[in-house]
Image (tube, rainbow, N blue to C red):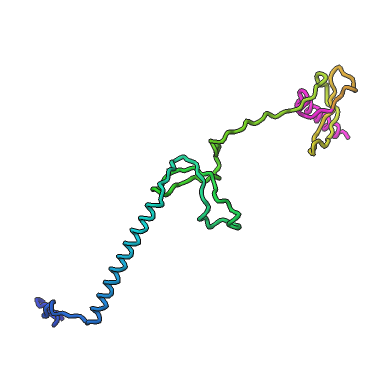
Amino acid sequence: MVEKGWNPEFPVDHLKKSLLNIHPTAKDFHDMWKRACDTAAKFIAEEKEYNNQRWDKSHIEPYFKEGDQVLVSTLNFNNLKGPKKMTDSFVGTSTIIKLIGKNGVLVKPYFQTEEDKFPSRKKSPTPPKIVEVEDSAGPVENIIKARKIRLNGKDQRQYLVRFKIQTADKDKWLAENAIPDGNLHLRRFRASRRTEQSHQ
């Protein structure tokens, strides 16, 4: 129990610090540990200096700028399936969005959908759709009947058209887009067929 106003002291407190000694084995271990730490620090500093020298000799500052389109190397990609020899060496193109330090860039994935992926490519104009229209013998009177034929490997519907002020031998089989005022006459033709089927 510590009494008020009295500071307890230990026998070691009465000894001079200069007279304190440690065991020789402990001192040897301390010296050995210090030498090992100094040697390790020296080797680390030398290795760091060597790496800096090699980096300075082989490193080339990137000349990329934001907005440039680049290819991305797949050399260090570990998530690609299939034999490595069969994979593409590069993927892209990707657009550089941001430069990160001296050695990193942030790119936009090339597969992201957008209106103009490759602005440098020249777009070929889309040829106009050619619709073959047969020469008609005049204004259409009505559509008599329909048929389905196989043309160029595809099913095509044709309609037998009768023209005004023409005899029956002038009737022609025409495609839907080749009939003058085709929408009007086709509506009438289909309505008449529905009426005939309802009376049967």
Relative image position of residue 112 (x, y in whole percent)? 54, 44
Number of marks in picture: 0
The reply to whether the magenta stretch includes residue 83 is no
Would you say residue 183 sits in the magenta stretch?
yes
- Residue beneath the point at 43% across and 41% down: 65
Is residue 8 among what the camera can see? no
Residue at 45 percent of width and 43 percent of height: 97
129 left or right of 160 in image: left
Quarter of the image containing the C terminus? top right
Q: Position of residue 27 (x, y in %)?
A: 23, 78
Residue lying farthest to the top in this orientation: 165
Q: Is residue 161 left or right of residue 32?
A: right
Q: Quadrant of residue 54?
A: bottom left
- Which residue is most to the left? 5
Name the main secondary structure of what is drawn in magenta. helix
Residue 12 vertical placement versus 174 (above, below): below
Q: As drawn, is 166 to the left or to the right of 15? A: right
Q: Quadrant of residue 3?
A: bottom left
Image quadrant in which the N terminus is located: bottom left
- Residue drawn at (29%, 69%) of the image: 37
Highlighted range, magenta: 173-200
* Residue found farthest to the front: 57
Q: Nearer the viewer, residue 14 or 33?
A: 33
Q: Residue at x 52, y 55 (%)?
A: 77
Residue 90, position in %: x, y?
54, 49
Against 73, residue 142 (above or below) is above
Q: Position of residue 126 (x, y in %)?
A: 64, 31
